[in-house]
Amino acid sequence: LPMDLLGPDGEVVASGSVGLSYVADSPGTYRLRVGDGWPVSYRIGLGVAWDDSDRFESNDLLADAPTLPPGLYPDLALDPGDRDYYAVDLVEGQQLVVDLEGLEATGPVAVSVLDPEGALVARAGTDGDYRPPKVTAPDDGTYHVLVEGTETAGDPVRAAYALNVSLALPANDPLEPN
């Protein structure tokens, strides 16, 4: 299916048949023209990255989540309308704590943990009494962390943050320390 990206002046700046990518060289309204005149069904996924987007972009979809070992990941960015997904491999009984550190945002931000099937298991937002989400894995698998802005009055949120991923194994003796 042919598609063209039209720049602010209406001229074609990029073309493709399956996908296309373009780095804007001027501000303005860009338009996407899809198809060749014949009626056809299609689906479009659109991602926009800013000049100061972080090293993990494009991680806007669950399928594109980079796998993170435990550690602190500084200099991350949440672009307006963006969602950032990260993957964390857990074993049964392992505890995951994810924390947003050094957050600077234009509005509230939420951090969520999803189980291997994509179901929400923990969530914390900065629009209230923020406490980092903590999850103990009932099964082995790849869990996902989602960082997203929670729009207020329709204004998309932009944020700079560090993500701290902590893992702990359960004690062998549930009565420890004794």
Image: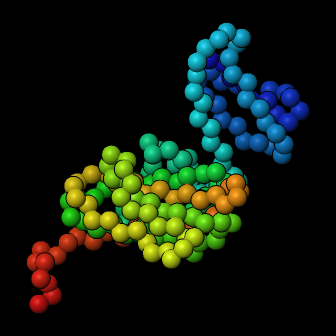
117 versus 72 height, above or below: above
The image shows residue 76 at horizontal and vertical percentages of 57, 62
Which residue is located at x 65 percent, y 24 percent?
16
| Quarter assignment of residue 139 | bottom left
| Quarter assignment of residue 21 | top right
Which residue is located at x 66 percent, y 48 percent?
49
Residue 109 placement, left or right of 171: right
Residue found at the very far right of the displayed protein: 9
Residue 58 placement, left or right of 81: left
The image shows residue 86 at horizontal and vertical percentages of 44, 55
Which residue is located at x 45 percent, y 49 percent?
65
How many numbered discs sit on the rendered protein?
0
Which residue is located at x 23 percent, y 54 percent?
140
Residue found at the very far bottom of the displayed protein: 178
Q: Which colour scheme is used?
A: rainbow
**Can residue 56 be seen from the camera position used here?**
no
| Quarter assignment of residue 122 | bottom left
Residue 169 placement, left or right of 80: left
Residue found at the very far front of the displayed protein: 153
**Can residue 171 be seen from the camera position used here?**
yes
The image shows residue 46 at horizontal and vertical percentages of 62, 38
The image shows residue 1 at horizontal and vertical percentages of 62, 17
Q: Which of 139 and 88 is in front in this view?
A: 139
Quadrant holding the C terminus: bottom left
27 versus 125 height, above or below: above
Residue 40 placement, left or right of 7: left
